[in-house]
Amino acid sequence: MKLNRRKFISRAGAGAALTVVWPFLPACENASSRANKPGINNEFKPDLDLEFSAVEREISILSGKKTRVWVFESQVISGESEAVQSLEGSYLGPVIKLRRGQKARIRFKNRLPEESIVHWHGMHVPEQYDGHPKDVIDTGETYIYEFEVMNRAGTYWYHPHPHGRTGPQVYYGLAGLLLVTDEKEKQLELPQGEFDIPVVIQDRSFDSDNQLVYLDGSRMSRMHGFLGGQILINGNPAQELNLKAGCAYRLRLLNGSNSRIYKLAWEDGSPLTVFGIDGSLLNQPKELPYLMLGPAKRADLWVDLKSKPEGARLAMHSQYFPLETMSSGMMGGGGMMGEPQTSLPHGGEYPVFTIIANTSGSNDYTLKDELYDTQLLNPSSANNMENPRQFVFAMDHMEWTINGRTWETYGVSGEEKVALNTTEVWELINSGSGMMGSGGMMDRDGGMMGDGGGMMDHHGGMMEEEENTSMQGGMMGNMMAMPHPVHIHQVQFNILERNADEVDPELWRAIKDGFVDEGWQDTVLLMPGMRTKVIMQFRDFTGLFVYHCHNLEHEDMGMMRNFEIS
Ligand code: C2O
Ligand code: CU
Ligand code: CU
């Protein structure tokens, strides 16, 4: 076995629970994953065959000095060259366009200075092509993906998935859109080509040398998740979309941020028209006063500039919502103890992008009242409708956990095993701060974090000089009350129920009209105290897949588990 030093250090540094776990990882972890690495199957006849690599580059993002980024680059070996469209001047990977039923071969070459693997977020693919963290490859190695597109028309995306390093790898630029179309979607005659616009929303921070700054290294800022000081749209700090007056558009929104949640609203107060979410178009378009878009979520937004004059501007903002975290809550946005310092407080009001109708044109796209007619899963077909599996996302022993467990590369517990060809309901629960005194921050013996403030010991001098207990109580309560955008691989699910009984009423009032719970989804945003029931079917493929919090820092810290389909 090859000892990967960086992996060892990051695991060791992640806290006591993980250092205990580490020596018990299978001794042949690397060797066995390498042995299973799929190669080129000559029987597989791809419609699209791609060279696809992750590599370090320097590009111009801000004026002046170039910025070092990590990018996905792709070249078509065979197939339609229009299937891969790079976003000029952006660190984002190319937009990959596939049709349902097509076969894709993607030859991922890792040219980064560290391990990586690519995950196709939302796609229904066999285990070995899903980008499971066990399948990471080293610098210089190649991983061959070969899969048939079985998904519905929708907006999917791709990003790396190595355990512990997904946050920084996405942050330094590794992400891109994967758009799937199908026959049913074609009949709707939705905007295409220059009228089908990617809008990837991310937050980033730069130093005075124009270089990207990730976390400050403290455990505290990882706990919160990265929050950047400025918004980039498609990798561009201008936050502007130049469109044409007289035309209608499909905007493919992706929240590609590591942990930031947006409450998107048009500045002029007009409603948003959403007609797609994650892996589906909706049966009917939906009008919302604002849209809550958590990390990893996609939404299709209809924008009609037909009656707008040339020169018109439409601004999209993120509106205020009261998120009680340390940076916005009890600490008053100050800079204590390394929580993210940002000029864009999470839940604050700030501009996200502006559409500028700087020229005019015309098209005759219209949005139909009846769209896709998706057949959703019938709850009575689930084998556990009355008794759903419950997964609690919580802080435990100062670790982010799911049902009290943290990440194990191959670990699957009994409650994480499901059967192929069954339909199940899962209840996903954000414990919020309701766990105080019942096992959340208390350790299992009921002691206050066991050793009297373990978390602060190595980092915040501040803490040690303060009156420990009262301070901790308030701070930990707030720390625990964090949103968790929960994502399940392999499936698209339907949301049956969103329960906000335990959500802070003030927060709920500010966000309740912003959820699109219709259609097929792969990620659901759980605010503190929130619970949802989702229904899904396990079909076609067996194996190990992951489910996790898509706050990438939470995921990297271990808020991820396997589930096994067999
Ligand atoms: Cu978008 Cu497991 O990831
Ligand atoms: Cu995914
Ligand atoms: Cu989380």
Image: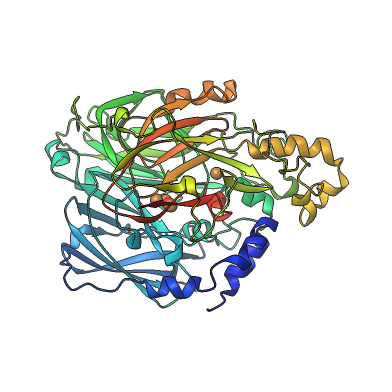
Residue nearest the observer in this picture, 317 or 225: 225
The image shows a total of numbered marks equal to 0
The answer to whether residue 38 is left or right of residue 334 is left
Residue 542 position in % (x across, y down): 33, 55
Most foreground residue, 497 or 115: 497
Q: Depth check: 80 or 416 in front?
A: 416
Which residue is found at the position 31% from the left and 25% from the top? 286
Residue 453 % position (x, y): 79, 47
Residue 422 position (above or below residue 85): above
Task: Specify whether 400 is left or right of 174.
Answer: right
User: At which x and y percent is residue 305?
Assistant: 26, 32
Query: Quadrant of residue 125 in the image?
Result: bottom left
- Give 366 or 165, whichever is nearer the viewer: 165
Q: Position of residue 484 (x, y in %)?
A: 53, 40
Residue at left offset 39%, top offset 62% = 118
Coloring applied to the structure: rainbow
Q: Is residue 128 above or below residue 233?
A: below
Rendered position, 182 above or below 428 = below
Q: Is residue 549 visible?
A: no
Q: Is residue 310 above or below residue 64?
A: above
Residue 547 is at least partly visible in this image: yes
